Amino acid sequence: MEEKGIEFIRLQFIDIFGVLKSMNITPDELDEALDGKLMFDGSSIDGFARINESDKCLVPDPDTFQIMPWRPTEKGVARMICDVHNPDGTPFEGCPRWNFKRVLREATDMGYEFNVGPEGEFFLFHTDDKGRPTLEIHDKAGYFDLAPIDYGEDARRDIVLTMKQMGFRIEASHHEVAPGQHEIDFKYDEALKTADKWVTFRDVVKNIAKNHCLYATFMPKPFAGENGSAMHCNQSLFKNGENIFHDPNGDYELSETALYYVGGLLRHAKGMTAIANPIINSYKRLRPGYEAPINIAWSNSNRSTLIRIPGRRGKATRVELRSPDPVANPYLIFSVMLKAGLEGIKNQITPPPSVEEDVYCLTAKQRADLDLTYLPRDLYAALKEMENDPLVEEAIGSHCYNRFLEGKYKEWNEYAEQVHRWEMDTYLRKY
Ligand code: ADP
Ligand code: MG
Ligand code: MG
Ligand code: MG
Ligand code: MG
């Protein structure tokens, strides 16, 4: 920090609902922070702590130290991602990051390294002269501009360059299917690092977009009738540096372990949906016809199923879970995915046969023959499924589990009480 002239340190963590929180300290306070003595009021964070047990500590992980390149270079700003502890130094059960480390230990005990590569999709909107997001997307606006500058392409280029400065290896970045929609893929890594990188990625996208007078949203489905944004989670298990999902002699060149892992994910697919798709709007994305999953099925390269095995083999053999969206808390969804996959391996859960048909186009009879079941269709159904699946509570810990359900039922009830535009349009004149 001395070398780089860092004057501010941002201590970051994300709450149960996936929202990034941060607290600024100066370098003078860093020693105290590293010793786990930096207290904050946990009752002010959604779902964290009640008022009578509210003192919590932020313990920064030095491995996550990063300079924020979009901040001034003189008197610069760095950040560190933190775990949350209790004042007596014990880890706080409601800290999603600490919880994920707990689940990761199960994989490590089995000799596995868990790797995740997420695909990041988001939309860019224009802002008004007060910097507030409008509903105008950049490329549509660009269409009518006198000098047709694509602000979105420029912003994305800047996002990629900034991520590179922060140590990301970018594999691809492109305009996505919907107008105003972009995708950036960075190279997979050991899962805790990937979860931290996802938090960083979202922060970079939002900040750089702002510098381009755009507003970036990870809201899963901003427009009816267009594709939504996902966070496909590509995952694999390595043992001694080898990808154990690959078996050149197996069906589809997949190992038995890979198939059991898929079996575990499918068995818990309903229970994990609320964690993968945590907001009301998430379920507007999970509709037929937009490359998002609706049924519980897996396939060898079909983009209409919940799980796809992308074509690449060898080190790149992976299971792609296509339901998670970009507002999911990465630590929580990774915890549940991993736990479900490990259960599949331990209990040797063989998945049903793969489905290679486009599941959006099946007749009712074909669907019945394939015995296809649906993912929960809204947040309420997903919460009910979560309550029916004890694995989810084991995976995210009782504290996160209970607070998540509490917060989300409240969100559902608020929504359910609203009268929506669609209802007025459809019913007002009809009845
Ligand atoms: P898609 O074909 O679904 O669009 P992408 O090419 O956009 O896939 O993204 C692939 C992602 O999978 C990248 O993040 C990549 O690093 C990741 N990936 C590659 N190999 C592995 C692996 N063995 N384990 C986990 N993720 C992997
Ligand atoms: Mg992709
Ligand atoms: Mg995509
Ligand atoms: Mg897409
Ligand atoms: Mg994908």
Image (spheres, helix red, strand yellow):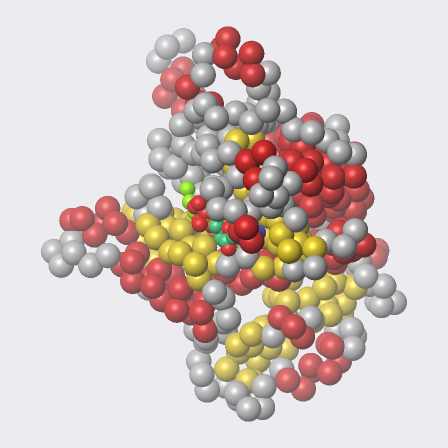
Quadrant housing residue 190: bottom right
413 relative to 365 in the view: left or right: right
| Residue 244 in sight here | yes
333 relative to 364 in the view: left or right: right
Q: Where is residue 405 in the image (x, y as percent from the top left)?
A: 71, 38
2 relative to 345 in the view: left or right: left
Identify the residue at image location x=50%, y=12%. 366
For the C terminus, the image quarter is top left
| Residue 102 in sight here | no
Residue 319 vertical position relative to residue 184 in the rendered view, above or below: above
Residue 213 vertical position relative to residue 318 in the rendered view, above or below: below
Quadrant housing residue 111: bottom right
Identify the residue at image location x=56%, y=84%. 7
Q: Where is residue 117 in the image (x, y as percent from the top left)?
A: 54, 53
Residue occupying the far right of the picture: 88
Q: Position of residue 116 (x, y in %)?
A: 59, 52
Residue occupying the far bottom of the picture: 3
Identify the residue at image location x=30%, y=43%. 179
Residue occupying the far left of the picture: 146
Residue occupying the far front of the picture: 249
Residue 414 vertical position relative to residue 15 in the rendered view, above or below: above
Q: So how many labels did they put on this image?
A: 0
Residue 150 vertical position relative to residue 32 in the rendered view, above or below: above
Q: Position of residue 145 (x, y in %)?
A: 16, 53
**In-front residue for pair 400/242:** 242
For the N terminus, the image quarter is bottom right
Identify the residue at image location x=55%, y=47%. 317
